[in-house]
Image (cartoon, grey):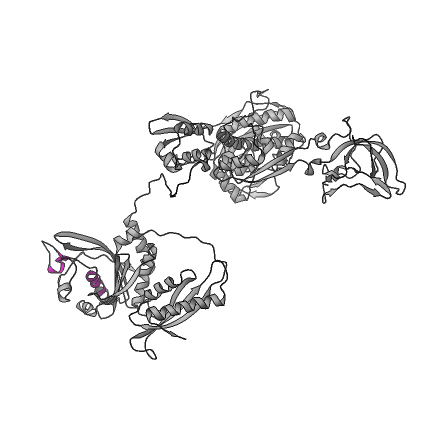
C-alpha cells in the first residue's frame, strides 16, 4: 500500500523527516518496506528555467538550425543553437542549462553540455514538451504565455511537486490503516498529535429536483447503503493538485468525478462509486443478487457470468455495478455526464471476497470492502466528495442524503484484566499510560473496576475482537523496544486450553489401527484364575477376586490383557477366521499391600497372514516385525521417538522386547509362549503387545516440524555386519547416532540373514546409511571418514565383523 508523505501532512502535524516517520510507522506495526522519492515530473525539472528569446538568426552552416540568444536571468544571455521551426525572437521558452539532466517522455535521460554545433557554440537547449516529460508533442518548442521574470525555475512555474512515498506492508487485519487518515491515526497514537479531519460543515442540500429511491433487498450482504444526487456538473480533467496526489500513489487520473471518488477512498479508506444518473432507469436503485448465469459487462469491457451470490447494484431494469468490487460499462461517468448518483455503502466482507475471487477482480474497492471498512463513514464520505465535486466540477446537491441502515453496527464491548495486560506484555505499565494509549486509538474506557476495566471498540477496528487484541494494541503503541528483555525468555497466553480428552486420544489411535487393517475387540475384565495356575505364572501383586463370582471362569479381574484376547483369537480361528489383527483398550487390576490398583492398557494381537489371499500378491505370514512396526507407528503418533528397546525373558513370551521411556516401561512386545497358546487350543503363532495406554496419553504431544527442502544431495552407503544373535537393531541404531549425529539422516535394515556361511550364534545385518550435510555437498573424503568411524565403533563396541 502506498502512502504519500505530502498528502499525509494535510491530516496531522508532521515534524519528522520521511525516513524518521517510516521508523515511527514501523514501530506501530505498519511496516514500511521502502521510502521512495517521487516527482510529478521525472527529474523535477532541475536545472531548467524560464527564458526569453532575444534574437534569432539562421545558422550560417545549417539550413534547418537557428542561432539564438536567450535571457535566462544570468549576467549575460546564452547563445543556443535550436532546430525547432517555430523558434522566434520575443518568445518565452523553457531552457535546459548546461549541466542539467532532462528526462524525455520516451527514451533515456541525457545531460546538457556546452558544445559547438556546426561551428557555433550552444550553451543549453530550448525545450519541447516531450523532451522534458511534460507531454508527447514534438511539433516545436514550448512557447509560454507568461510575464514571469527570466530565470524563474521551471519546477515552480509548472508546479512540480517533490514527495516521498511509503510502501507499507499492510497485514490483512489492519484495513483501518488502508488510507492516509488511517495511517495518521496510528501516528497520532504514537506521537500524541491530533488528526485533522477534513470539514464537511459547508455541506448542504441545494434542491430536491433529482430524487432516486434506494431499496436494499439483501440486508445480510449490504448492511448500509448511502447516496445522494448532484446535477449541473461538468466532467473534465482534474486540477494538478488532485492529479498529483493520485499519481504519487500509483493511480492514473481519469476525470474529475472519478478522481474525486478515488481521492476520498485513499483519503479515509471508504470506497465510493459514481453513476451517471441519466442511466439509472426508473430513478430507482435496488441492491440484490441475481439469477445464476446472468450476463454483465464490467468497465473493462469484459462480459462476465454472475453467480447467485454476487451482490449487484441495479436500476429498475438491469444491473449497473458489482457491489463493492467493479462498476459496469453502461452506467459509468463519461464526458457527457451532467448529473450523478454518488454511492457510499458498507457490504459484508464475505460476499465481496467470494465475488472478487470468483471473477478474478482485485480493485482498490474490493481490497477494502472484503476486509471491512468503517461503516460509520458512509455519510461523511458522501458529504466530503460532494463538496469536492462542487468545488472542481460545479453543480449542486439535488437530493437529501439517502441512508438505508436497518441495523446499526455497534461498538464491541471487551473486558480487560490488569493482570493479563502486565502478564502478556511482560512489563507493568501504569493504568494512566494504558488509558492514554487506548484513548489515542479511539478505544473508549466505559467502566473501571479495581482489577479490570471495560472498553468500547469502534467498528472500524475489525482486528480488535477480544482481550488479547486490546493488549496487543497497548503494546504496539507503547513500543516493543520499550519492553526490556529478561535473561530467561518465555511465552504466555490468555486462552485456557481445553484439557486433553482421553477418549478422543483413544479414537485417534484406534482409527490409525483400523486404517492398518485391525479390528477393535471388547472383552470382559473378568477371567479364569486357572490360566495363571496351569501355566505356573506369577504376576506382581495379588489377583483381585470377586466376592460373589458367577463362575470360576470369571472369578478374578485380569492381571494381563493376554488371556481374554486369546479367547477371542481362539474363537475366530476355530471358525476359520485365521488372519487375526485385533486391538483392545482395557484395564488390568491387582492388589498391592491391601490396596487395589487398576491400570489402562492397549493390547494388540496378530496372527495368520498379513493379507487376504489374492491374485496380485503372495500371502506372507505375520511376524514379530510386523507387529513391532505397528507399535512403532503408534509411538510416533504419540510423539514418542526417543525410546529404548531391550531383550527380556518374560513368562508370557517365547521371546520379547521391553520398550522403555526413561525409567517408565511403555510395554512389552513378542511371540506368545507356545505352552500358553496350547492352553487355548491355538496352534498358529500369536504375536502380542501390551502397552501402558495411560503413559501414552500423558506423553502424547505430537509436534509438526516444518523445514526447508535440503539444497544439497544426500548420499547412500551400505554396510554388512556379522554380529552375535543377542545384538538387536536398537543397539546398532543408538551407537550409529551417538558416533555421528550431524551427517547421518537415516538408517535402515534391508536384510537380516542367518544360516549358510554365517557362524553359529551369529547373524548378518545389511544396513543402509543416508548421509547429508545441510550446508554443503559432501565430498568422497568426508563420506569415507564417516563410514570408517562407524565401522570402527561397530567393531569395538559390538564385536562386529564387517563383510567387505
User: Of residues 536 and 188, which is closer to you in this image?
Assistant: 188
Q: Where is residue 414 in the image (x, y as percent from the top left)?
A: 38, 31
Q: Where is residue 306 in the image (x, y as percent from the top left)?
A: 53, 42
User: Of residues 155 and 408, which is closer to you in this image?
Assistant: 155
Would residue 133 appear left or right of 361 to someone viewing this image?
A: right
Quadrant where the C terminus is found in the figure: bottom left
Magenta-drawn segment: 541-569
272 lies above or below 612: above
102 lies above or below 239: below
Residue furthest to the right: 60
746 lies above or below 360: below
Would residue 541 appear left or right of 138 to someone viewing this image?
A: left
Would residue 772 appear left or right of 450 to someone viewing this image?
A: right
Is residue 568 in the magenta section?
Answer: yes
Residue furthest to the bottom: 757
At 28% across and 68% down in the image, what residue appears?
A: 608
Q: Is residue 666 visible?
A: yes
Q: Position of residue 728 (x, y in %)?
A: 31, 67
* Total marks placed: 0
Is residue 233 in the magenta section?
Answer: no
Q: Quadrant of residue 789?
A: bottom left
Q: Is residue 333 visible?
A: no
Q: Where is residue 386 in the image (x, y as percent from the top left)?
A: 59, 25
Quadrant where the N terminus is found in the figure: top right
Amino acid at each position: 500500500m502506498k502512502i504519500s508523505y505530502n498528502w499525509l501532512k494535510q491530516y496531522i502535524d508532521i515534524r519528522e523527516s520521511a525516513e524518521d516517520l517510516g521508523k515511527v510507522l514501523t514501530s506501530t506495526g505498519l511496516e514500511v518496506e521502502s521510502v521512495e522519492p517521487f516527482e510529478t515530473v521525472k527529474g523535477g525539472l532541475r536545472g531548467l528555467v524560464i527564458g526569453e528569446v532575444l534574437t534569432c538568426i539562421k545558422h550560417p552552416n545549417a539550413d534547418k538550425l537557428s542561432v539564438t540568444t536567450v535571457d535566462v536571468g544570468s549576467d549575460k544571455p546564452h547563445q543556443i543553437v535550436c532546430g525547432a521551426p517555430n523558434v522566434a525572437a520575443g518568445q518565452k521558452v523553457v531552457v535546459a542549462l548546461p549541466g542539467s539532466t532532462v528526462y524525455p517522455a520516451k527514451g533515456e535521460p541525457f545531460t546538457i553540455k556546452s558544445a559547438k554545433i556546426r561551428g557555433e557554440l550552444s550553451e543549453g537547449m530550448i525545450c519541447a514538451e516531450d523532451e522534458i516529460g511534460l507531454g508527447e508533442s514534438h511539433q516545436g518548442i514550448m512557447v509560454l504565455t507568461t510575464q514571469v521574470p527570466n530565470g524563474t525555475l521551471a519546477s515552480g512555474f509548472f508546479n512540480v511537486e517533490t514527495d516521498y512515498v511509503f510502501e507499507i506492508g499492510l497485514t490483512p487485519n489492519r484495513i483501518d490503516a488502508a488510507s492516509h487518515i488511517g495511517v495518521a491515526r496510528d501516528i497520532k497514537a504514537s506521537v500524541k498529535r491530533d488528526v485533522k479531519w477534513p470539514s464537511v460543515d459547508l455541506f448542504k442540500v441545494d434542491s430536491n429536483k433529482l430524487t432516486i429511491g434506494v431499496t436494499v433487498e439483501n440486508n445480510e450482504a449490504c448492511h448500509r447503503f448511502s447516496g445522494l444526487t448532484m446535477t449541473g456538473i461538468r466532467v473534465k480533467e482534474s486540477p494538478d493538485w488532485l492529479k498529483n496526489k493520485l499519481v504519487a500513489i500509483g493511480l492514473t487520473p481519469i476525470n474529475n468525478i472519478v478522481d474525486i471518488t478515488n481521492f476520498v477512498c485513499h483519503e479515509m479508506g471508504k470506497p465510493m462509486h459514481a453513476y451517471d444518473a441519466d442511466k439509472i432507469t426508473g430513478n430507482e436503485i435496488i441492491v440484490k443478487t441475481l439469477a445464476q448465469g446472468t450476463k454483465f459487462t464490467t468497465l473493462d469491457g469484459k462480459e462476465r457470468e454472475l453467480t447467485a451470490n454476487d451482490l449487484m447494484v441495479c436500476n429498475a431494469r438491469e444491473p449497473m455495478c458489482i457491489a463493492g468490487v467493479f462498476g459496469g460499462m453502461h452506467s459509468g461517468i463519461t464526458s457527457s455526464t451532467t448529473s450523478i448518483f454518488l454511492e457510499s455503502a458498507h457490504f459484508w466482507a464475505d460476499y465481496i471476497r467470494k465475488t472478487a475471487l470468483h471473477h478474478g477482480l482485485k480493485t482498490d474497492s474490493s481490497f477494502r470492502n472484503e476486509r471491512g471498512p468503517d461503516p460509520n463513514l458512509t455519510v461523511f464520505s458522501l458529504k466530503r466528495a460532494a463538496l469536492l465535486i462542487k468545488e472542481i466540477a460545479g453543480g449542486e446537491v439535488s437530493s437529501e442524503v439517502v441512508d438505508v441502515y436497518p441495523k446499526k453496527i455497534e461498538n464491541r464491548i471487551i473486558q480487560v484484566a490488569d493482570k493479563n495486560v502486565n502478564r502478556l506484555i511482560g512489563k507493568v505499565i501504569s493504568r494512566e499510560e494504558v488509558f492514554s494509549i487506548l484513548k489515542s486509538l479511539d478505544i473508549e474506557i466505559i467502566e473501571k473496576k479495581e482489577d479490570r476495566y471495560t472498553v468500547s471498540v469502534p467498528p472500524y477496528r475489525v482486528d480488535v475482537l477480544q482481550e488479547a487484541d486490546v493488549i496487543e494494541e497497548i503494546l504496539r503503541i507503547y513500543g516493543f523496544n520499550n519492553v526490556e528483555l529478561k535473561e530467561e525468555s518465555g511465552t504466555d497466553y490468555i486462552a485456557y486450553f481445553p484439557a486433553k480428552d482421553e477418549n478422543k486420544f483413544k479414537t485417534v489411535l484406534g482409527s490409525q489401527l483400523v486404517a492398518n487393517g485391525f479390528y477393535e475387540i471388547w472383552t470382559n475384565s473378568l477371567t479364569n484364575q486357572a490360566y495363571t495356575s496351569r501355566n505356573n505364572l506369577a504376576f506382581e501383586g495379588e489377583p483381585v477376586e470377586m466376592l460373589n463370582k458367577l463362575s470360576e471362569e470369571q472369578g478374578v479381574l485380569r492381571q494381563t490383557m493376554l488371556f481374554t484376547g486369546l479367547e477371542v483369537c481362539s474363537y475366530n480361528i476355530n471358525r476359520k477366521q485365521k488372519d487375526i489383527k485385533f486391538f483392545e483398550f482395557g484395564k488390568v487390576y491387582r492388589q498391592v499391600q491391601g490396596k487395589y490398583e487398576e491400570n489402562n492398557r492397549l493390547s494388540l494381537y496378530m496372527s495368520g497372514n498379513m493379507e487376504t489371499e489374492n491374485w496380485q500378491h503372495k500371502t506372507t505370514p505375520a511376524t514379530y516385525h510386523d507387529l513391532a512396526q505397528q507399535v512403532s507407528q503408534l509411538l510416533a503418533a504419540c510423539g514418542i521417538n526417543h525410546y529404548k528397546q531391550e531383550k527380556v525373558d518374560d513368562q508370557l513370551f517365547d521371546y520379547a522386547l521391553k520398550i522403555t521411556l526413561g525409567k517408565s516401561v511403555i510395554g512389552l512386545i513378542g511371540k506368545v509362549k507356545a505352552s500358553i497358546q496350547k492352553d487355548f487350543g491355538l496352534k498358529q503363532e500369536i504375536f502380542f503387545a501390551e502397552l501402558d495406554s495411560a503413559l501414552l496419553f500423558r506423553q502424547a504431544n505430537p509436534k509438526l516440524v516444518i523445514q526447508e527442502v535440503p539444497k544439497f544431495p544426500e548420499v547412500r552407503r551400505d554396510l554388512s555386519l556379522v554380529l552375535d544373535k543377542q545384538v538387536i537393531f536398537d543397539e546398532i541404531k543408538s551407537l550409529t547416532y551417538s558416533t555421528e549425529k550431524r551427517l547421518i539422516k537415516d538408517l535402515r535394515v534391508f536384510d537380516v540373514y542367518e544360516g549358510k556361511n554365517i557362524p553359529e550364534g551369529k547373524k548378518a545385518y545389511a544396513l543402509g546409511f543416508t548421509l547429508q550435510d545441510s550446508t554443503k555437498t559432501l565430498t568422497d573424503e568426508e563420506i569415507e571418514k564417516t563410514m570408517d568411524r562407524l565401522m570402527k565403533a561397530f567393531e569395538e563396541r559390538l564385536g562386529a565383523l564387517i563383510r567387505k
